[in-house]
Amino acid sequence: DAIDRLKQRRAASEVEPKTRKRKRDSCDVGAVARTYKTRSRTSKEDEEARNFEHVTNRPLALITLRFGNYNSIAPVAFLRCGVSKKSTYGPDEYMSLVLTSKIGQGAIGSVYHAHMELLVDGHAQSTTVVVKVASQEKEVEGLRHEYRIYEHLSRKGVVDGIPLVFGLFKDTESEVTALVMNHVGTDLWDLRPDKTKEFVRVSKETENAYVRILKSLHDADVVHEDIRPQNLMLKDDHPTIIDFTHARLDIEKDRKEAEIAELIEVLHEVPEIPREGNSMRPSSPLDELEDEDLSETENELVI
């Protein structure tokens, strides 16, 4: 399995991912931007995430699982898409990601909370991030599409109100792919004060902020196409729109206006039952045992 593929004699200062020929590069996402513009954030955690923007230059991510019944004894090496593999990596060329809990299933792949740590000038820095993992071919393609949308938005200068993306990475020994982003809070569905009610209430100021974010996407000719409570995040009164799996480029004014109307409707009334297959509700690690897509992914990550 993936653990046996890794050499356990890794030194603290360098790692050696095993080399293996590939038939094709499933990381082909086109031009990959190396930096992201600084965002104006308000919360402590977002300020920490901003301090980690230089991590977008690190070519290697070492991923382990450590929650529930999972406790990886060695990390799995994931290489940043768009960079060439090397034989060794110094301490300033990789980051460590420990997956600590499963958030749920996104539109594609599985989504995890993770602890990210890296050495900067000999000092350890850490923060909480979100890692979306895909293993099936269709899921991986969806993840690559989502990353391309984030790249497009970055080039257009859209940085506020969307996740800060640290990079897209691929397992050096399989097609399992991981998208690493900063943690942006809790979705509006889970923030309902009364879980028996269909309504989620936000202030007019917060509603206007969501509308401004969506309009900024539209100004960049991106239509989200999946506006629902589970994709509307809030942390310290700072709103964020996530999950661009279904997003597409569209210059049609009518579609953009219709999506603004959909957003306002969602903010006023939330259906009691989320759309099947796209729930971002937190779940138990035991749920993975019944999840066919997830089981194949985790076979790549743990014994």
Image (cartoon, rainbow, N blue to C red):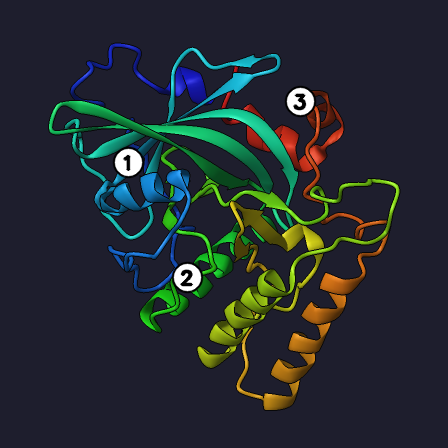
Amino acid identity at mark 2? Asp
Label 1 or label 2, whichever comes before in sequence order = 1
Mark 3 crowdedness (10 Å alpha carbons): few <14, some 14-19, many ≥20: some
Asked which quadrant contains residue 85, the reply is top left
Amino acid identity at mark 3? Pro
Near-viewer residue (225 or 177): 225
Label 3 or label 2, whichever comes before in sequence order = 2
List x then y, in percent, for residue 20: 32, 34
Q: Which residue bears the numbered disc 3?
A: 285
Label 3 or label 1, whichever comes before in sequence order = 1
In the image, residue 124 sits, relative to residue 185, either above or below, namely above
List x then y, in percent, for residue 104: 65, 37
Near-viewer residue (150 or 186): 186
Name the element at disc 1: strand
Mark seen at residue 123: none
The alpha-carbon separation of the residues under discs 3 and 1 comes to: 27 Å
Mark 2 crowdedness (10 Å alpha carbons): few <14, some 14-19, many ≥20: some
Q: Which residue bears the numbered disc 2?
A: 160
Viewer-nearest of labels 3 and 2?
2
Amino acid identity at mark 1? Leu
List x then y, in percent, for residue 13: 16, 19
In the image, residue 142 sits, relative to residue 47, either above or below, namely below
Near-viewer residue (222 or 179): 222
How many labels, in total? 3
The alpha-carbon separation of the residues under discs 1 and 2 comes to: 26 Å
Q: Which residue is located at x 47 percent, y 74 percent?
A: 216
